[in-house]
Image (spheres, rainbow, N blue to C red):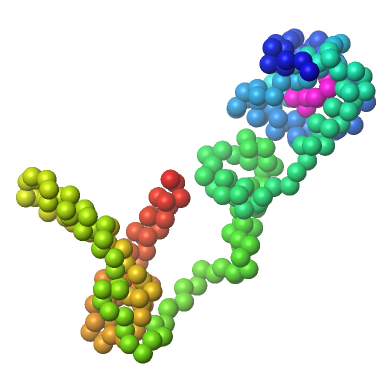
Amino acid sequence: MADLFDRVERVPRDELIPYANNPKEHPDEQVNKIASSIKNYGWDQPIVVDGDGEIIKGHGRLQAAERLGLDEVPVIWREDLSDAEAKAARIADNKTAESPWNDDLLATELEVLDEFDDVELGFDDGEIEDLLDEFHEDDGSGVEYTDKIKTPEYQPTQDEPPDLSELYDRGRYDDLLDVIESKDLPDELDRFMRLAAQRHVIFDYENIAEYFAHADAETQELMELLTLVIVDYEQAVEQGFVNFADDTLEGVGDA
C-alpha cells in the first residue's frame, strides 16, 4: 500500500476532474456547510484522486473550495488503485460515513458550544435548538419534567431517629484541621482556614431527612433555616441556597 502521508500536496483546483458518474449527490445546503467547516476549521480531509486527477473522494469538498474561491486544495494521489478499486473506494467512502447519532451525547456536547451557530457545526438553521428542546423534554429516563415545584413531605420511615453522628462525616474535615494546626498561621488566617475546612464535612441528607421527620417543631424550624431540608422552596430561593446549588452544579459540569 502506498505511503499516503508522503503523498499529500497542494494542487490547483482546476486540475482536478470530478467523477462524472459519482452516485453521491451534494446539494447546495450541504456544500455550504462543508465550506463553512473549511473556512472555520481549515482542511483536515484532503481530496483523494487517482493518477489522472479524477476524484475518488471529496467531490463535496471540491465544490466547497470553488465556493470559497480557493485556488489550491490539498490532494492525496492514489495511482496505486485500479479502476475497479477506485470505484469501490468511492462508494465505500460515502457508505461508511453513514451512521446514527447518540442524541444524548450530542446534546451534551452542543450545550457547551453555544458560541457556534448551527451552520458552523454542520446543522440546518434552528436544528440544534429543536434537538436540545427534544432532549430536555425526554432524557430517555421515562420521567416527565415540569417547572412545577412539589413541596417535599418528610414522614418517618423508622421507629427511632438516627443518631446525630449518623448525619454527617467529618473525617476529611478533621484531617484538614490537623494540617492547619500544624502550621504557624496568623490568628485571622487560621480562623479563615478552619472555616474553609468545614466545607469538607459531608452531610447524609437521607438520614437528615429522617431525623427532621422525628424532630420537634422548634428543631425542624432551625433545620429548615439552615437549609438542611427544604420545605418552602421560595424561602430557599430567598436564602440563596438554590442559586448556590445551581452554580455549584454548573461548575461541576464545566470540569
Q: Nearer the viewer, residue 207 or 111?
A: 207
The location of residue 92, given as percent across then percent down, is: 84, 32
Residue 126 belongs to the span the image colors magenta: no
Q: Nearer the viewer, residue 215 or 113?
A: 215
In the displayed structure, does residue 240 sit left or right of residue 30? left
Q: Nearer the viewer, residue 95 or 114?
A: 95
The location of residue 215, given as percent across then percent down, is: 28, 85
With respect to residue 48, does 218 lie above or below? below
In the displayed structure, does residue 218 sit left or right of residue 106? left
- What residue appears at the point 8 percent right and 45 percent down from the top-left corner? 184
Quadrant the C terminus occupies: top left
The location of residue 212, given as percent across then percent down, is: 32, 81
Which residues, given as a range, are shown in magenta? 55-61
Q: Nearer the viewer, residue 41 or 94?
A: 94
In the displayed structure, does residue 83 sit left or right of residue 30? right
Residue positioned most to the bottom: 159
Which quarter of the picture shows residue 109? top right
Which quarter of the picture shows residue 142? bottom right
Residue positioned most to the left: 187
Residue 57 belongs to the span the image colors magenta: yes
- What residue appears at the point 61 percent right and 61 percent down from the top-left corner? 139
Quadrant the N terminus occupies: top right
Q: How many labels, in total?
A: 0
In the displayed structure, does residue 155 sit left or right of residue 108? left
- What residue appears at the point 73 percent right and 15 percent down from the top-left corner? 3
Q: Is residue 70 visible?
A: no
With respect to residue 205, does 200 lie above or below? above
- What residue appears at the point 52 percent right and 39 percent down from the top-left corner? 115
Q: Is residue 45 visible?
A: yes
